[in-house]
C-alpha cells in the first residue's frame, strides 16, 4: 500500500511543480521589463517577513535542532538574511545600469557602440540546506530578486518546523507566481531537481550535488553549487596562539560546527602542538564553562548526524588516536535524554586513513595535524580536493602569499575563520569539489542575470566601407592587412 501511495504523491507534487513553473515563466514573460521599483518591493517584502517572524524562526529552529540558542539563530539566520536584501535594495539601480564596453577600431570612430544589458534569467530553483535554513533560503533571494527573477524553493526535510514556517512566510509575502515553496522529503527533492529551471542553486553536500547536477543536465539547466569539503586552518609559528584559538573555536563551536566554512582540520607546527591544544581548551572553556546544560550551545541536528559524528570518534579511538573532549564542566554526555549535544572534541594527529579526515565533518570535531616545514602545509592542501575556504593565522608575508597563490580554495580568511562570508561585496562560492559559481552582492546579481551582449551599428554602410560586402576588392585587402598586422 505504501509504495503506490508514495508514487501517486510524487506524481501529484511533480505535476503541481510543473504547473507553478509554467505559471511563473508565463507571468515573467508577460511582465516584460522588471523595473527597479518592482524588484525593491519584492526584496522589501522578504525583509519584512523575516523581521515579523523572527521570534517564530527562533522557536522553529530550536525545535528542529532539539536545542539551538536564540542568539545563534538571530546572529546567523535572521541578521544575515536581512542584510543582503538591504544591501541589494541600496545597490540595485547601480547594478542594473547598462555596462558600456569598448568598440573595435574603426567602428567606434564611425559611431558604432557596444554594451551589456543585464537581463533576468526567468525562474530560479533554490534547494536549501538544514544548517542555516532561513539564511540559505532567503539570503540567495537577495540576488535572485534583485536580478528580476521568480523563484521556486525546496527546503530541507531535516528541519521540518522551519520549512513549514517558511512556507507560511512565503505564502503570506508573495504570490506563487513570484515565489513558491515545496516542502517534503527526498521524493519531492528528486522531482524538484529535475525541473527545467532557468538556473538552479543547490546548497548542501558534495555527494548529493552530483545527483543534482546530473538531474539538471538533462534539461541543460545551469547550476550554482555551494558545497563544502575539508577546509584547512593553517597556524604559523609566529601566530598568536591565544588569538588564533579564540577565533578558531568560535567558528568550530558556533552552531556546533555545523557550518560549511568551519575549519575541518588544523595544521600546526610540531613543537607548538601542546601549546595549541592548551589554547583551544582555554578558549572553549571561556565561551562555554558548561556545555550539556548550557542553552547557548547548539545540539547536533538529529540522531543520524549524531551517530555519524560518534562514528568518527569511535573510528579514531580504534586507531589509537588521542581523542580529547573539551568538557570544562565535567558533564556526563551519555546521560542526555533530549537533544544530541557533542562537546568540542580534539583528535590529535590522526592517520590519513581515519574517517574524520576523509569526509566533511560538519560538527564540533577538530583534527589537528602537525608540520615541520611550512611548505608541508601547502603540499598537503594541494594533495586534497579544493576546499571551500582556507584559513591562515600568522604574520609572515611569504607564508600568506603562499596560501593565497599556491593553494586554490573558494575563499580565504587571514587571521580568522568564516568572516569572509559576511562581506556582501565579496563573492561567496567554492571551486571544483567545493562548488561552482558564486553569489552575494553584485556577484549574486550577475550570477542570476544574463549578461546580454548588444552591438548597435552606425548609420554608415560599414560592410561596404570595410570591404566585407562582395564583390571584394582593395578595401577588402586593406581590412585583412589591418586585422592580421603583427
Image (spheres, rainbow, N blue to C red):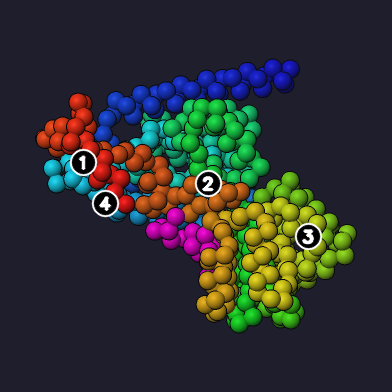
- Say which label, 1 or 4, has the lower sequence index: 4
Q: Is residue 282 visible?
A: no
Identify the mark at residue 436; answer none if there is no mark. Answer: 2
Estimate the spatial distance between the alpha carbons at disc 4 and disc 2, rounded to whole Å. Answer: 26 Å
- Is 8 inside the magenta-drawn segment? no
Q: CA distance from mark 3 to mark 2?
A: 27 Å
Q: Hey, which quadrant is residue 400 in on the image?
A: bottom right
According to the image, label 4 marks what residue?
94
Q: Specify the label residue 352 is tagged with.
A: 3
Q: Which mark is residue 478?
A: 1
Mark-to-mark CA distance, 3 and 1: 65 Å
> Is 368 placed above or below 106 here?
below
| 136 left or right of 189 in image | left
Residue 365 seen in the current view: yes
Q: CA distance from mark 4 to mark 3?
A: 49 Å
Residue under the image location 57 percent in, 77 percent down = 394
**Which stretch is magenta?**
411-427
Q: CA distance from mark 1 to mark 4?
A: 42 Å
Tell which of 94 and 135 is nearer to you.
94
Disc 1 element: helix
Does label 4 or label 3 sit earlier along the sequence?
A: 4
Residue drawn 54% across the image and 39% down it:
127
Amino acid at each position: 500500500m505504501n509504495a503506490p501511495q508514495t508514487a501517486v504523491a510524487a506524481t501529484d507534487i511533480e505535476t503541481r511543480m510543473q504547473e507553478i513553473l509554467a505559471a511563473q515563466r508565463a507571468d515573467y514573460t508577460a511582465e516584460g521589463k522588471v523595473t527597479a521599483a518592482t524588484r525593491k518591493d519584492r526584496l522589501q517584502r522578504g525583509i519584512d517577513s523575516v523581521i515579523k517572524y523572527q521570534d517564530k524562526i527562533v522557536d522553529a529552529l530550536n525545535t528542529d535542532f532539539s536545542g539551538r540558542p536564540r542568539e545563534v539563530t538571530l546572529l546567523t539566520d535572521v541578521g544575515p538574511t536581512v542584510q543582503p536584501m538591504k544591501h541589494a535594495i541600496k545597490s540595485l539601480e547601480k547594478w542594473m545600469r547598462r555596462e558600456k564596453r569598448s568598440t573595435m577600431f574603426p567602428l567606434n570612430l564611425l559611431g558604432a557602440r557596444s554594451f551589456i544589458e543585464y537581463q533576468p534569467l526567468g525562474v530560479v530553483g533554490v534547494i536549501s540546506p538544514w544548517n542555516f535554513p532561513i539564511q540559505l533560503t532567503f539570503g540567495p533571494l537577495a540576488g535572485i530578486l534583485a536580478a528580476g527573477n521568480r523563484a521556486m524553493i525546496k527546503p530541507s526535510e531535516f528541519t521540518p518546523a522551519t520549512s513549514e514556517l517558511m512556507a507560511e512566510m512565503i505564502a503570506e509575502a508573495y504570490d506563487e507566481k513570484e515565489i513558491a515553496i515545496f516542502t517534503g522529503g527526498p521524493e519531492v527533492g528528486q522531482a524538484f531537481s529535475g525541473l527545467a529551471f532557468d538556473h538552479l542553486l543547490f546548497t548542501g553536500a558534495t555527494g548529493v550535488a552530483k545527483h543534482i547536477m546530473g538531474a539538471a543536465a538533462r534539461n541543460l539547466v545551469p547550476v550554482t553549487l555551494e558545497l563544502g569539503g575539508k577546509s584547512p586552518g593553517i597556524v604559523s609559528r609566529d601566530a598568536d596562539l591565544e588569538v588564533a584559538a579564540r577565533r578558531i573555536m568560535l567558528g568550530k563551536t558556533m552552531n556546533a560546527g555545523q557550518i560549511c566554512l568551519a575549519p575541518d582540520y588544523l595544521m600546526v607546527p610540531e613543537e607548538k602542538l601542546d601549546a595549541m591544544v592548551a589554547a583551544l581548551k582555554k578558549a572553549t572553556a571561556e565561551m562555554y564553562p558548561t556545555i550539556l546544560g548550557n542553552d547557548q550551545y547548539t545540539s547536533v541536528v538529529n540522531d543520524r548526524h549524531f551517530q555519524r559524528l560518534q562514528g568518527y570518534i569511535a573510528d579514531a579511538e580504534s586507531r589509537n588516536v588521542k581523542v580529547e573532549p573539551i568538557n570544562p564542566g565535567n558533564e556526563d554526555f551519555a546521560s542526555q535524554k533530549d537533544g544530541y549535544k557533542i562537546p568540542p572534541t580534539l583528535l590529535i594527529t590522526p592517520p590519513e586513513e581515519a574517517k574524520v579526515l576523509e569526509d566533511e565533518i560538519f560538527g564540533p570535531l577538530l583534527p589537528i595535524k602537525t608540520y615541520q616545514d611550512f611548505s608541508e602545509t601547502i603540499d598537503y592542501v594541494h594533495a586534497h580536493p579544493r576546499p571551500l575556504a582556507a584559513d591562515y593565522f600568522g604574520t609572515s608575508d611569504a607564508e600568506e602569499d603562499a596560501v593565497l597563490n599556491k593553494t586554490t580554495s573558494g575563499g580565504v580568511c587571514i587571521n580568522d575563520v568564516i568572516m569572509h562570508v559576511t562581506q556582501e561585496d565579496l563573492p561567496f562560492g567554492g571551486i571544483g569539489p567545493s562548488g561552482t559559481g558564486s553569489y552575494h552582492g553584485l556577484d549574486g546579481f550577475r550570477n542570476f542575470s544574463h549578461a546580454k551582449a548588444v552591438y548597435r551599428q552606425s548609420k554608415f554602410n560599414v560592410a561596404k566601407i570595410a570591404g566585407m560586402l562582395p564583390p571584394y576588392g582593395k578595401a577588402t585587402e586593406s581590412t585583412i592587412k589591418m586585422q592580421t598586422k603583427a
